[in-house]
Image (cartoon, rainbow, N blue to C red):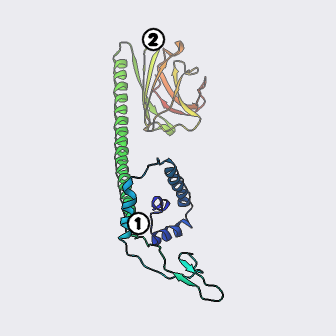
Amino acid sequence: MLAAYALGALDAAESRLLEEHLATCTDCRAEIEEWRDTTSALALSAEVVEPSAQLRSRILESVRAIPQNSVDRKTSSVDGIGVAAQEDGNESVKGAASNVIQMPLDARRRWSAALTFGALAASVAIIALAATLFVLWKRLDNLQRQYEREHTAVDVLAKQLAEEREMREMLTKPGVRMTELNGLGPGQQASAKVALDPRTGRAMLFAYNLPPAPAGKAYQLWFISDIKHPVPGAVFNPDAQGRAVMRDQAPEAGRSASVFAVTLEPAGGVPAPTGEKYLLSPLS
């Protein structure tokens, strides 16, 4: 109703209802000021149009067709409308018949009703559009989530296939030694396999069911050819399922290793084992 109110197109009851609301709503008061500025701008932006010669005659004909009500008023009436004659002395003041014509309100009421209906129709259309956009947004969000889940599953599967292919290539390469590691202590349920190519030093570790490493810690692989001098390997962390695939390049001193171990160490790794053993291959 704000636009119609700014245009002065509401009837008295509608205006009173809206004014009661405006007294308690700062948002609507701010918006009505914007609508008033807009209506003022419209009035200033309108081009001056010269009325046609027939306009005056049509207006006068419309006015003459309206019944005139003569109303006697005194000159002291509040609205000041009317013609009065006052005689000299203490004679009474007589009000002459008024020539004011009461214009019909039917057209104004029709305009107000049309604006109100238009505002309601626009509100319904906006609500319907908002509901449609919400439904589309929910569908799009569900499709996005489904795509992300499927994409993640595809990535995991592709990663697993790549690891299996790499493992197969490593295991079938001539001269590569495969050693199994068994779980110890907190990692009793864990297991691992280490593939080592003694000629190139290329090594791969495949671990399963390892517990998550605490904050600031990581697992470290050890190449052991001399029990008193283990050679440090790379550090790694398992995923949420306790799985880990670690690629390493064994130092020259570790390429002849026949025993392998995994301990829990500081995240950056250490030159000599200090933490608890989680995985260990059988001693040869």
Q: Residue furthest front?
A: 88
Q: Is residue 18 above or below residue 273?
A: below
Q: Mark yes or no: residue 152 visible.
A: yes
Task: Identify the residue shown where x is 40% and y is 59%.
Answer: 56
Q: Mark yes or no: residue 122 visible.
A: no
Give the camera-side residue of 214 and 43: 43
Q: Residues within 10 Å of mark 2 (few under 14, many from 20)?
A: few
Q: Residue furthest right?
A: 89
Give the camera-side residue of 189 and 69: 69
Give the camera-side residue of 271 and 28: 28
The tag earlier along the polypeptide, 2 or 1, is 1
Task: Identify the residue shown where x is 52% and y is 12%.
Answer: 252
Q: Is residue 56 above or below residue 75?
A: above
Give residue 203's position: percent from left, percent from top: 45, 19
Q: Amino acid at mark 2?
A: Thr
Q: Quadrant of residue 147?
A: top left
Give residue 64's position: percent from left, percent from top: 37, 70
Label disc, if present, on residue 163 of the rendered structure? none
Identify the residue under disc 1.
108
Identify the residue under disc 2.
200
Q: Are marks 2 and 1 in contact (CB under 8 Å)?
A: no
Give residue 58's position: percent from left, percent from top: 36, 61
Task: Identify the residue shown where x is 54% and y is 82%.
Answer: 95
> In the image, is 145 to the left or to the right of 31?
left
Quadrant containing the N terminus in the rendered view? bottom left
Q: Amino acid at mark 1?
A: Arg
